[in-house]
Amino acid sequence: MNYLFLDTSYNSISIYVIQNNNVLISNQKIVQKDMANSILPLLRELLNSCNLSINNIDKLFVTVGPGSFTGVRIGVTVAKVISSCLGIPVIPISTLEFLASITSNYKKIIPIIDARRGNVYYAVYDNNLNLLVKEQLTPLQLIDKNDAIIVSYDGFAGSKIMDIDILKLINKHQLDKPINPHQLVPNYLKKTEAEEKLNDKKN
């Protein structure tokens, strides 16, 4: 079985190609701008390096947020197009669970994503990626960090950047029921900036 995993929820494109429980290739490319035009050529290049084409992919996994509004939207759109046009089953993955997919001795893993204005997106998982506290938007200072490892790319005090164990994540979700690609939508956890400004005007 050939699996493809996509994450575009930050300022980078993360792509993993997995074959029979082995990671054939993993790549994280920082993209400061024009992510939409960068992702498909990069995907094609990586698949070619594995002697595969997109038609050889049996299942597609994609992070659906929370994270960068633009980044999440690009990843979700690419996954929807691939799934709907080629009939490849697609499985949505939380960006926070993706971040929590690390090797750790801690009983609690807390992935954190900066949501601006002192707020963060966060959730709490155990070492088997079971959800202990549901993903939510909250002020950073309200998070109970005791006996936990904090995982983040945003440079918060006490947080760490850890290598992702993608097989841990894939093995948990490979038997999930795929969704209709037309039902694949971003999970922003909060309103977009444009929606917030419109709401402010109404109030």
Image (spheres, grey):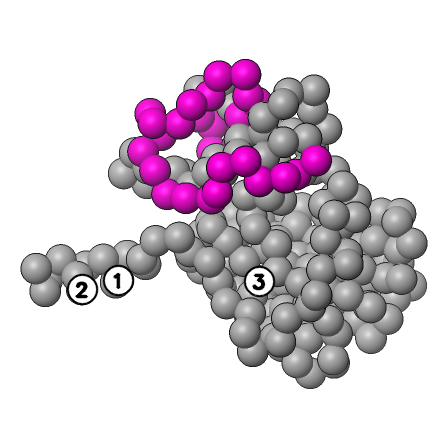
Q: Position of residue 182 (x, y in %)?
A: 56, 78
Residue contact at pointers 1 and 3, CB within 8 angstroms: no
> Which residue has dot 1 on it?
194
Magenta-highlighted residues: 128-156
Q: Quadrant of residue 90?
A: bottom right
Q: Nearer the viewer, residue 37 or 13?
A: 13
The stretch drawn in magenta includes residue 143 = yes
Q: Quadrant of the C terminus?
A: bottom left
What residue sits 86% from the left and 62% below the top?
2
Q: Secondary structure at mark 1?
A: helix
Indicate the position of residue 198 as horizontal and vertical percent values: 18, 64
Q: CA separation, marks 2 and 3?
A: 26 Å
Q: Earlier in the sequence, mark 2 or mark 3?
A: 3
Q: Which residue is mark 3?
A: 75
Look at label 3 and name its amino acid: Gly
| Label 3 secondary element | helix
